[in-house]
Image (cartoon, rainbow, N blue to C red):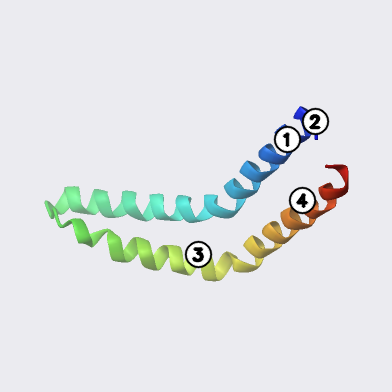
Amino acid sequence: MSDQMVVKLVSDAFYTVLLVVGPLLLASLVVGLIISIFQAATSISEQTLTFVPKLLTVFLVIVILLPYMLEKLTTFTKEMIGYIPNM
């Protein structure tokens, strides 16, 4: 296995992780920002207020994007299995 192949495998792995987890993190970030603005405007300093909406948002995004995530992970897995003879 050459250095170039290792770099390509790691690069593909990071890119796949970014594609799969990115929408979840982005949705959580947006909800957290909205709730933080609401808390700052109303002077509510309850730490648990952000937890439930973020949890529900991440769950909803997972339900909506699950086919996309599975397709990306399946494609990545097939590519990795295809690389086995070259190793």
Q: Amino acid at mark 3?
A: Val
> Which label was assigned to residue 6?
1
Viewer-side label of 3, 4: 4
Up-down: is 36 above or below 63? above
Mark 3 Cα-neighbour bin, 10 Å: few <14, some 14–19, many ≥20: some
N-term-proximal mark, 3 vs 1 = 1
Mark 2 Cα-neighbour bin, 10 Å: few <14, some 14–19, many ≥20: few
Q: Residue furthest top?
A: 3
Please provide percent x and percent y for residue 60: 47, 69
Q: How far apart in space, not on screen, are marks 3 and 2 (Cα)?
A: 38 Å
> Which label was assigned to residue 61?
3
59 left or right of 67 in image:
left
Up-down: is 6 above or below 69? above
N-term-proximal mark, 3 vs 2 = 2
Viewer-side label of 3, 2: 2
Q: Are marks 2 and 1 in contact (CB under 8 Å)?
A: yes
> Which label was assigned to residue 53?
none
Q: How far apart in space, not on screen, are marks 3 and 4 (Cα)?
A: 27 Å
Mark 4 Cα-neighbour bin, 10 Å: few <14, some 14–19, many ≥20: few
Quarter of the rendering containing residue 5 = top right
Viewer-side label of 3, 1: 1
Please provide percent x and percent y for residue 11: 67, 37
- In what quadrant of the picture does the N terminus appear? top right
Q: Amino acid at mark 2?
A: Ser
Residue at image position (88%, 48%) is 85
65 left or right of 49 in image:
right
> Which label was assigned to residue 2?
2
Mark 1 Cα-neighbour bin, 10 Å: few <14, some 14–19, many ≥20: few
